[in-house]
Amino acid sequence: MYDELKYWYLRDHKLFWTLSMSQIKQLCIITGFKKANKGDIIYFSSSEVPRIYLLKKGNIKIVSIDENGNETIKEILQKGDLFGELSLEADENINEYAKVLTDEVSICSFLLSDFEDLLVRNPTLALSYTKFVGLKMKRFKNNYSNLVSKDAKTRLCSFLKDWAEREGIQDGLKYRLTNYLTQVDIAQIICTSRQTATLLLNELEEKKIILYNRKEIIIEDISKLN
Amino acid sequence: MYDELKYWYLRDHKLFWTLSMSQIKQLCIITGFKKANKGDIIYFSSSEVPRIYLLKKGNIKIVSIDENGNETIKEILQKGDLFGELSLEADENINEYAKVLTDEVSICSFLLSDFEDLLVRNPTLALSYTKFVGLKMKRFKNNYSNLVSKDAKTRLCSFLKDWAEREGIQDGLKYRLTNYLTQVDIAQIICTSRQTATLLLNELEEKKIILYNRKEIIIEDISKLN
DNA sequence: AGCAAATTGTCGGCTAGTTTACAAACCTTT
DNA sequence: AAAGGTTTGTAAACTAGCCGACAATTTGCT
């Protein structure tokens, strides 16, 4: 791929902010680059060589399948997010793949082994990376405890809040979201059945708290989402 | 504290196996040491200075309380486990504490800042630590998906299996566990009500799959736990 | 435009598990 | 050994959310 671009891609990511431009140039570990379209499936676990991926553009969901064939959404990723063997250890018995949600997606990747070398040579980067993984863990733990102690309605609201704060276009208390998720997706994210999700979304719409359609979601007043 | 002991404590932990004895001696970052008894509560989040703790002896549970005062068990820790600010970033809005489960517990601790310095100076250690945090995340994710897709009975069985493999005294397919958990604890771990946990435990006992009392749990045949 | 596929809406029946409530068994302390 | 607290056992009423089934709507495709 076009060499100049490589380090810009990395440069973009928070993790690499601490590094100088010349350091970034030195590493240039990106080895793969691909574009994909809505509906495409990208296998990454159980792939030949373990890699770490950086989502450059678009949105994808990480889905895992258990023994019984049940699909669970693990994460929704946006531009700038990392995925793949983030724990730096290949793990065959996890069966995950990524599914593309938006029209045009681009992803670049580097080899796990290259990244490890890089971390060993840049202890400060290693430290930031550990914090980054730690943060991710905290988010998981948080979702997990919501799942235990909150009902489906609360979980939907906090998901919408989260989404709005992450990706929404803000205008005072109003947020506008490009909706690339189906109600089935949303249901899976908040761990409920599709029917319940539909019910709750319509309920929120009736109460004029949100405005929902397949293209976008408008949250009239985010403080009412509770 | 007695200086010789310090590095033995660290030496014991998998994380530090890669380091030579002299390296360990050099660091000697342990700054705190305490003993505690059954029922004691150890606050560590929201403590003055962020620390990482190493459980040397005994068992503790990590409990968190949400806004509404609901207790959730986050983890059960055994000898050798680390806890505290593992993500290397203090976080005030998490309200966690540790409660001692067994008779005699000893814990040592070091300052987060000291540990960071250490990681920066030992890239290999930093890498192992990152993998360690990553592994922890994987375990959480796994529990989390069990919670979503499996019923209470299955969750109980896989918890017992886990526990037996981790701490049980094995004898063929038979495992003997020292039971330092109440049924309330078990219920919280598998995320169900106390009554359901009681019911399920008695059911397992009736089917002669386990033998349960307050002192110990005997699993007659671990392969039957499913 | 017209058809097929995907997505959303709606409705009972059903069940796993919660909640409330109380009693029995047990451990600890004096 | 009696008292008091904690932990377990059990039962009935209740409910959030699941499941199956089917219709209506929207979207993508040729």
Image (cartoon, coloured by chain):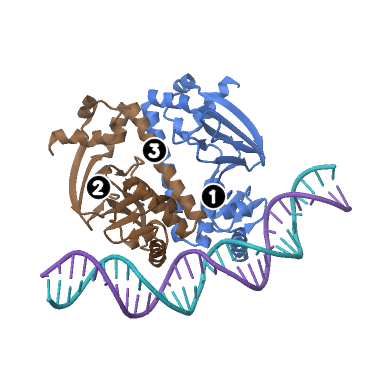
Chain colours: A brown, B blue, C cyan, D purple
Nearest to the eye among marks 3 and 1: give it.
3
Measured in 3D between alpha carbons, the distance from the residue under mark 3 to the one under mark 2, in whole angstroms, is 20 Å
Report how far apart the C-alphas of labels 1 and 2 lie in the structure: 34 Å
Per the image, label 2 sits on a secondary structure element best described as: loop
Q: Which mark is residue A48?
A: 2
Residue A170 seen: yes
Residue B172 position, x and y percent, is 54, 53
Residue extending farthest to the front is: A172
Tell me the subunit letter for badge 1.
Answer: B
Which of disc 1 and disc 3 is earlier in sequence? 3
* D28 up-or-down from B168: above or below: below
Residue assigned mark 1? B163
Q: Position of residue A9 (x, y in %)?
A: 22, 37
Classify mark 1: helix, strand or loop.
helix
On whether disc 3 and disc 1 are found on a single subunit, the reply is yes
Quadrant in which the N terminus of chain B is drawn = top right
> Residue A31, percent across and down?
19, 39
Q: Amino acid at mark 3?
A: Lys
Tell me which residue sits at (43%, 24%) in the image.
B118
Measured along the vertical axis of the image, is residue B145 above or below residue B24? below
Report whether B224 appears left or right of A24: right
Residue sitting at x 37%, y 29%: B124
Q: Residue at x 40, y 58 (%)?
A: A209
What's the residue type where badge 1 is placed?
Answer: Trp
Where disc 3 sits, the SS reads: helix
Chain hosting mark 2: A
The residue positioned 54% from the left and 54% from the top of the image is: B160
Residue type indicated by callout 2: Glu
Determine crowd level at label 3: few under 14, some 14-19, many 20+ residues with C-alpha closer than 10 A: some
